[in-house]
Amino acid sequence: MNVRNERFTLQAGSLAALAAILWGGTTVAIKMALPGIPPLALAGIRFFLGGITVWIWARVIGISLKMEPGEKKPLLWLALLFLLQIYLLYSGTHYSLASRATVLISSYPFFTAIFAHYFIAGDRLTRLKFLGMALSFTGVALVFSESLTLDAQPYLLGDGMVLGSAVLIGIRLIYLKRVTQDTHPARAVIWQFGLSLPVFCVLSLIFEGDFRFALDGPILGAVLYQGVVIGGFCFIVLYSLIRRYQASRITVFAFITPVFGVLLSKYLLGEGLSAALLGSMVLVAVGIGIVNYDSN
């Protein structure tokens, strides 16, 4: 399979940076909405709203969303990866703090770079990237070392789930790049959402049936942010860029995400900023930047 890796442009970088900034509010919005909506139902609502946003975009640009011959199996695998990754993110954030989840989920470019090295031609690791990987892992290890202390031990399960979600994002983005060489990103997004949504709904009815839903202004705003801004706009931008450019070049901008995520966690949720968390944020950001830096 011929994989597109076009020359990176200022416009592409600007869009990637904007998406990364907006993504910084994801775990904060999840945490704000969880008191009124349980994790599985919240994920389902997010991707229902995201699906509507993508559907409108596809209609505007004239892209058919009908699954073409030969797309069924790849899109089913994509939906399965997506389903598991989102479950780990939402449930993990529930058992952790938004600031910790932001730092951990922002390690996904590290895993993307590793998988790209083995599965995407022209997107190889270098010695400099290995240095960045070491720094990123040190940052993640700092978060987990704090999780093992008495005060932060309750977050260990959630931290592990969110890190697992980051690994799955890396796998999904590389698989996505291969899939979207023959499938338009709009079709990939809509079927990813559409095939996952019934599963989220059924699981929510089974495991969250006794939950008392509550909606107020902040919760509704958090849900709309996750659905329209993240599930719609950011997915459209990311999938379109991943299709055309090196996966590791696009995901470098994720180093912006933990900075905004941690700051939003502090000012919107009142979460404290420990020395270990601040240090891990810096190490993950610097490491990811080095991993994805390529002057060519």
Image (cartoon, grey):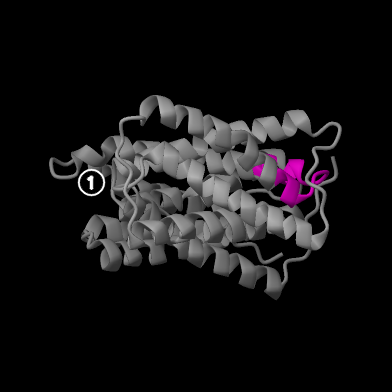
Foreground residue among 44 and 131: 44
Which segment is the magenta one? 174-188
* Residue 270 in the image, given as x and y percentages of width and height: 22, 63
Asked if residue 8 is positioned above or below residue 36 in the image, the reply reads below
Magenta: main secondary structure? helix
How many discs mark residues in the rendered view? 1
Q: Quadrant of residue 207?
A: top left
Q: Looking at the picture, tell me which residue is in the foreground, 68 or 116.
A: 68
- Image coordinates of residue 89 in percent, x first then y, are 43, 42
Q: Is residue 115 visible?
A: no
Residue 257 in the image: above or below residue 4: below
Is residue 115 placed above or below 125 in the rendered structure? above
Name the residue that disc number 1 marks.
146
Determine whether, in the image, residue 108 is placed left or right of residue 190: left
Residue 217 highlighted magenta (yes or no): no
> Where, quadrant-wise, is the N terminus in this rendering?
top right
The image shows residue 145 at horizontal and vertical percentages of: 25, 43
Label 1 amino acid?
Glu
Residue at 80 percent of width and 41 percent of height: 66
The quarter holding residue 281 reads bottom left
